[in-house]
Image (cartoon, helix red, strand yellow):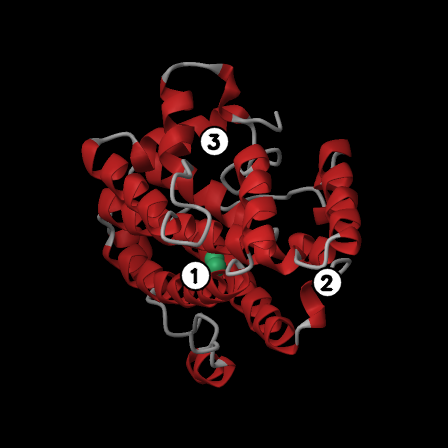
Amino acid sequence: MASFDIDTYLARSGAVDLWAVDWAGVPKHPLPPGAIRTLRYMQDIESHTIVYLRSLLATRAIDDPDVATFLACWVHEETFHGLALERFLAAAGHPMGPRPKPHGHENFAQWFEARSTALLSRLWPDFCAVHMTWGAINELTALTGYRRLAARAGHPVLTALLEHIQRDEARHFFFYYRQAELRLQRPAAARVSRFLVDRFWGPVGTGVQSLDELRFMASYLFGDEEGRAAARKVDETIRKLPGFDSVRLLDAWLDRFHDGGRNGDRND
Ligand SMILES: [Fe+2]
Ligand SMILES: [Fe+2]
């Protein structure tokens, strides 16, 4: 299998151009309340990337030069997703308003998760395999979520903005996925990664956002037939990774939510 070409990635990397967006056109089109609520959720997640980076820097993630270079671009692009969504919401007349400082969000569970991740990374040389797999799942979920949001909101300026964001998420996904493919070739790495994903994976925002927001977003984006099919496609793609052929992710998580169970959020 060919190794990943970081130069190809870098050549196409670039932040959303905030000056090219038709902000004045935003209030000219209706924006459904469900889209506003979902955008607020997503904006919060995007602007948290820098906090996730703090945890990642305490791991082996930056030992590999390609991964380190990627992460620098990744955090830059995700930060601009947060800024663009914040600006969009303000232009639509629904500003995010004051929020606690990022570190104020860190509750005990998150603190513990960050420390456990750092410890796991120190003890386990193949840590990058699970990090890359985790990243691939989350980027593909984000990409799918944005595609669904654009379809549901039907707002032309938002659609154009989300197209750029989706291109970034697709590039992020591709990097993580290729890296995961390579690193999961080792059966032991695949076995441990699979165990960790089965045991701990939940959509981004789990443990940060309230269960109500998570549930609303899940039903808004993935509640109808088309949404469910998109969620299933995420799982199908991840199943192609070595050792993940029977994994159940987004689809199973939606099942747990829709059953009305309180177990949709394992970190709750
Ligand atoms: Fe993003
Ligand atoms: Fe991303």
Q: Is mark 1 within 8 Å of ligand 2?
A: yes
On the image, the x and y values in percent for residue 221 come to 32, 37
Q: Is residue 42 left or right of residue 151?
A: right
**Label 3 SS:** helix
- Mark 1, residue position: 173
Q: Quadrant of the C terminus?
A: top right
- Mark 2, residue position: 60
Q: Quadrant of residue 127?
A: bottom right
162 is higher (above) or lower (below) than 109:
below
Marks 2/1: CA–CA distance: 20 Å
Q: Residue at x 47, y 55 (%)?
A: 136
On the image, the x and y values in percent for residue 250 come to 40, 37
Pointer 3 or 2: first along the chain: 2
Q: Name the front one of labels 3 and 2.
A: 2
Pointer 2 or 1: first along the chain: 2
Marks 3/2: CA–CA distance: 30 Å
Confirm whether residue 201 shows in the render.
yes
What amino acid is at disc 1?
Phe
Confirm whether residue 30 shows in the render.
no
Q: Residue at x 37, y 54 (%)?
A: 143
- Mark 3, residue position: 214
